[in-house]
Image (cartoon, coloured by chain):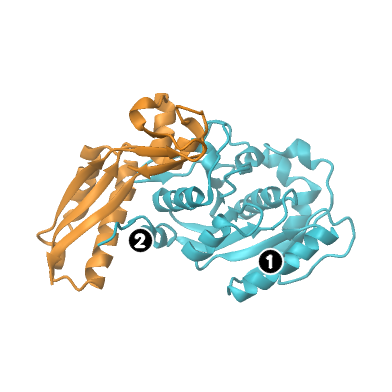
Chain colours: A orange, B cyan
Amino acid sequence: MHEWALAESVVKAAREHAAGSKLRAVLEVGVVLGELQAIDKDIFSFALAELGKSFAGEFARCRFKLLKEPAAFKCRACSKTFTLKVLKKTPQEGEYIHFIPEMAHTFLKCPKCKSPDFDITAGRGVYIKHIRGTQ
Amino acid sequence: MNALDPRPSVINERLSGIGRIIAVTGWKGGIGKTVTASTLALLLAEKGFRTGLLDLDFAGASAHVALGAGNAFPKEEKGLEPPVIAGVKLMSVSFFSGKKAVPLRGANVSDAIVEMLAITQWGKLDFLIIDMPPGINDAALDVIRLIPGAEALAVTTPSVMARSVLERSLTLYKRLKVPVLGVITNMAAGRKTTARGRWSGGVRIDTGLEKALGRPAALLKTAFARDLGAIISKAL
């Protein structure tokens, strides 16, 4: 249930944003789950639902929409762009990347030049894409 | 709206059960920051304080070696609960790197620090000791940005080079309004030490220290630990 900690952060950040934007009702929060971190969507949904039980006021009618984002990489050494599908990792390495996505630089390498010096250009981890509501 | 990173919003909450956060810092490499941070954590735990140790030296993580953490791994429970080694809750990137190098650029270091701070469930602690990497870099700036209550404990040696760098670091901490608890002068050997704050003093060169690394009970019996213990006993 490491997902719980990240779900908590989503709820707290959404609340802070809603307060800052003076939203009277938050209707939808779009949350991106990056492919690299391999967040378990069911566990994440469960955590959001549990955390949502305490919702009231402007969040009473809020739903969380979970969006998947494929991981993409660009090598800084040779400029090759690549996806997660072409990279090999053991289940253990995958679990380490699940906890700290930056461990990708330890276990993964550019398929062309083998460098660990690449940018994660998309699909790293969890972020909020949109918050829709009424002012 | 622009993409919103939710993780920083919970960092304060994750650290809310901690009494004092002390960043053991020093801008030169090889001056004994990790041994100081690890021994300080062990000494505080021995005195009965609930203590944690966070290793933020991603490139050279070694607090787990100093404590002899072996195959310890955090427990997954609404986040990650650090394993307890000799009474100290330890969190380190080494748990996730499988004994391999961690080649991270600055932005990646920041992202990894935010992730660790967001998911680590420290619970109630009297002290959290942070083992900082050498220099004033992403990790140091992130600690100042994300943990505004952190106090610095500087480590130096009697070397003219280390002391020159120390002076610059103290000036910057003052400008950034980071409280400095003191200066630990490692490998002092009776030479002049720098006194800045209550947690200041010299620690002898200890030839038995190397053999004690990885064995917390032995580490606590070294002359190094005795000298460091005398400094903090006066300060606490």
Check disc 1 and report the residue beneath it.
Answer: B169
The answer to whether the residues at label 2 and label 1 have Cβ atoms under 8 Å apart is no
Number of residues whose C-alpha sits closer than 10 Å to that of mark 2, classed few (under 14), some (14–19) or many (20 or more): many
In the figure, B210 relative to B169: above or below?
above
The number of callouts visible is 2
Which of the two labelled residues, at mark 2 and mark 1, occupies the earlier sequence position?
A: 2
Q: Position of residue A83 (x, y in %)?
A: 35, 33
Number of residues whose C-alpha sits closer than 10 Å to that of mark 1, classed few (under 14), some (14–19) or many (20 or more): some
| Residue ID at (28%, 66%) | A16
Residue A61 showing in the rendered view? yes
User: What amino acid type is highlighted by mark number 2?
Assistant: Ser
Check disc 2 and report the residue beneath it.
Answer: B9
Comparing B175 with B69, the one in front is B175
Comparing B59 with B116, the one in front is B59
Distance from the alpha carbon under mark 2 to that under mark 1:
29 Å
Given the image, what chain letter belongs to the residue carrying mark 1? Answer: B
Q: Position of residue B60 (x, y in %)?
A: 63, 43
Q: Is residue B149 left or right of residue B36?
A: left
| Residue ID at (23%, 50%) | A31
Q: Position of residue A13 (x, y in %)?
A: 29, 61
